[in-house]
Amino acid sequence: MSRSIKRLAAGTAAAACLGLAGAAQADVFNQRMMSMELANDIAEAAVLACREKGHQTSAVVVDRAGNDRAVLRDNLAAVQTIQIAGDKARATVMSGTSSGNFRDNREDIRMEMNHVDGIIMLEGGLPIEVAGSMIGAVGVSGAPGGDLDEECAQAALDSVQERLDFAM
């Protein structure tokens, strides 16, 4: 009898440990992160797309947490365009949609949100997605209108779309 109780106790203890291990794993997860090379390629493609249209711009690529991964300012772009581009990218990460869509969808709080440090409610920020998950965003500033900034951001994403589609 005592041997059966010991086996039962050992089995119960083992099951409890396995159960706890499973619970602990639920608290830890893997997160996709873009490489420095991908971030740089997106920023460069955005600035070059705007340059081809005659606009001097800056592009900022941020990760999912809103941290800068790549910052690029064209030769004659105003220095302020760096901050504005970054704020557009961070607004995109915060909202989960393009900065222009965020602005349009939240007209009720647009002015208040422009007073939050680190974001701005203007067109020109687009999400960077892999397999339906946002891994970051790109923001562009300096063209004569947010719609043109967004076109350059989209051109940059289009230039790396195959890499995003086949990312592991």
Image: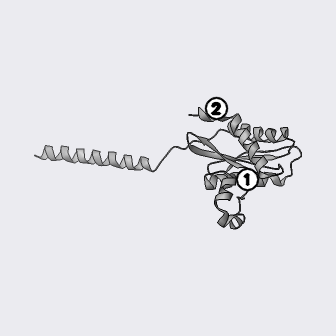
**Residue 167 or residue 151, whichever sits in front:** 151
Q: Relative to 77, is 152 on the left or the right? A: left
The residue where tag 1 is placed is: 123
Q: Residue furthest left?
A: 1
Q: Relative to 45, is 66 on the left or the right? A: left
Q: What secondary structure is found at the residue carrying circle 1?
A: loop
Quadrant assignment for the C terminus? top right
Residue drawn at x 33%, y 45% as measured from the top left:
18
| Residue kind at label 2, given as amino acid type | Glu
**Percent coordinates x, y for residue 73 in the rendering:** 82, 45
Label placed on residue 91: none
Disc 2 to disc 1, C-alpha distance: 24 Å
| Mark toward the start of the polypeptide (2 vs 1) | 1
| Residue kind at label 1, given as amino acid type | Glu
Tell me the quarter of the picture where residue 3 sits. top left
Q: Residue furthest right?
A: 76
Residue drawn at x 61%, y 42% as measured from the top left:
129
The residue where tag 2 is placed is: 162
**Percent coordinates x, y for residue 142 in the rendering:** 82, 50
Q: What secondary structure is found at the residue carrying circle 2?
A: helix
**Percent coordinates x, y for residue 88 in the rendering:** 72, 53
Tell me the quarter of the picture where residue 37 sits. top right
**Percent coordinates x, y for residue 64 in the rendering:** 62, 49
**Residue 2 or residue 166, whichever sits in front:** 166
Few, some or many residues within 10 Å of mark 1 (<14, 14–19, 20+): many
Q: Relative to 167, is 8 on the left or the right? A: left
- For the residues carrying marks 2 and 1, which lies nearer the camera in this image? 1
49 to 77, vertically: above or below: above
